[in-house]
Image (cartoon, rainbow, N blue to C red):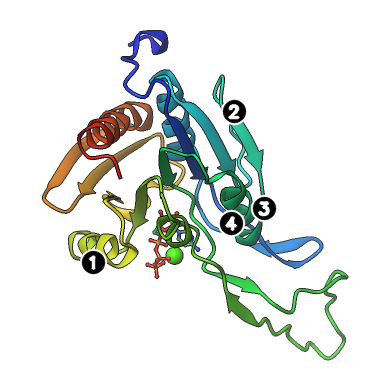
């Protein structure tokens, strides 16, 4: 299907998306990251743009090309992602949190590269909790319609339902199987307050278009 021919279901709407992994430094040459490739977040940014939205994409480190017409802001750490999102959150109609945000940052990161020592002593990392970006946006007055993502390693249906309620958001999307990272295809389940909608295995760009359709139907039905 040709991109330009997608129905303009989000014309005039502003959509903010996080994508990719975050990177939490340990020292100037090392850090903690995760397996997110950013493919699903970028596919959603492209699909939202095709649907006529004004799209801002806050992206952790990825090897992906910016979708045409999308405003991309690059960040590394969860804290930087939080700051960029909060700076752009006001006036957004939809927020889609696809990024795999590090839950913890390293508080004792070294200003210089850590070196092996003669006695073989091991480095000790200390952690602090990162801010929850999705929860912060969902708590804003006049908040956008908030969509979360979840990759669970077990019991997706149970955890997905509970996570949507805990996060206080209208829609949560579960990746079926945690082996989605880096792949071009995926399989999704959508949890809202009434139903579970299953999107069978397909290319991420196709799933992204289906998800954008679901989101646009929901914001037109029941603006939050
Ligand atoms: N998220 C976020 N900021 C964080 C952590 C998560 O915005 N600091 C968002 C993710 O982008 C995703 C959703 O919250 O849309 C769920 O992330 P997930 O890691 O599954 O949830 P957590 O609440 O961190 O729970 P846990 O990792 O313990 O399962
Ligand atoms: Ca997490």
Q: Nearer the viewer, mark 2 or mark 4?
A: 4
Residue that label 2 marks: 66
Q: Nearer the viewer, mark 1 or mark 4?
A: 4
Q: Earlier in the sequence, mark 3 or mark 4?
A: 3
Cα separation between marks 1 and 4: 23 Å
- Residue closest to the far front: 141
Q: Earlier in the sequence, mark 3 or mark 1?
A: 3
Q: Relative to 213, is 127 above or below?
A: below
Q: Are marks 3 and 4 in contact (CB under 8 Å)?
A: no
Q: Residues within 10 Å of mark 1 (few under 14, many from 20)?
A: some
Residue 29 locus on image (x, y percent): 79, 60
Left or right placement of residue 199 versus residue 30 in this view: left
Cα separation between marks 3 and 1: 29 Å
User: Which one is in front, 177 or 219?
Assistant: 219
Q: Residue at x 76, y 74 (%)?
A: 109
Q: Residue at x 74, y 63 (%)?
A: 30
Residue that label 1 marks: 162
Is label 4's Cβ within 8 Å of ligand 1?
yes
Secondary structure at badge 3 equals loop
Q: Residue 80: name its quadrant.
A: bottom right
Cα separation between marks 3 and 4: 11 Å
Residue 33 locus on image (x, y percent): 59, 59
Residue 202 locus on image (x, y percent): 27, 31
Residue that label 4 marks: 82
Label placed on residue 76: 3
């Amino acid at each position: 299907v040709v991109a330009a021919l997608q129905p303009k279901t989000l014309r005039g709407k502003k959509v903010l998306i996080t994508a990719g992994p975050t990177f939490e430094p340990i020292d100037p040459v090392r850090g903690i990251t995760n397996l997110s490739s950013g493919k699903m977040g970028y596919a959603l940014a492209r699909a939202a743009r095709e649907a006529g939205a004004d799209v801002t994409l806050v992206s952790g480190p990825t090897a992906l090309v910016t979708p045409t017409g999308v405003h991309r802001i690059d960040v590394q750490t969860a804290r930087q992602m939080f700051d960029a999102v909060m700076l752009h959150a006001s006036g957004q109609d939809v927020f889609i949190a696809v990024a795999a945000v590090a839950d913890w940052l390293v508080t004792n990161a070294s200003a210089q590269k850590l070196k092996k020592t003669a006695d073989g002593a091991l480095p000790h990392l200390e952690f602090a909790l990162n801010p929850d970006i999705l929860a912060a946006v969902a708590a804003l007055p006049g908040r956008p319609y908030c969509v979360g993502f979840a990759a669970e390693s077990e019991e997706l249906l149970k955890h997905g339902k509970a996570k949507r309620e805990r996060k206080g958001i209208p829609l949560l999307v579960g990746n079926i199987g945690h082996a989605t990272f880096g792949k071009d295809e995926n399989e999704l389940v959508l949890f809202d307050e009434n139903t579970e909608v299953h999107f069978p295995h397909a290319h991420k760009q196709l799933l992204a278009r289906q998800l954008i359709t679901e989101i646009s139907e929901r914001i037109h039905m029941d603006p939050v």
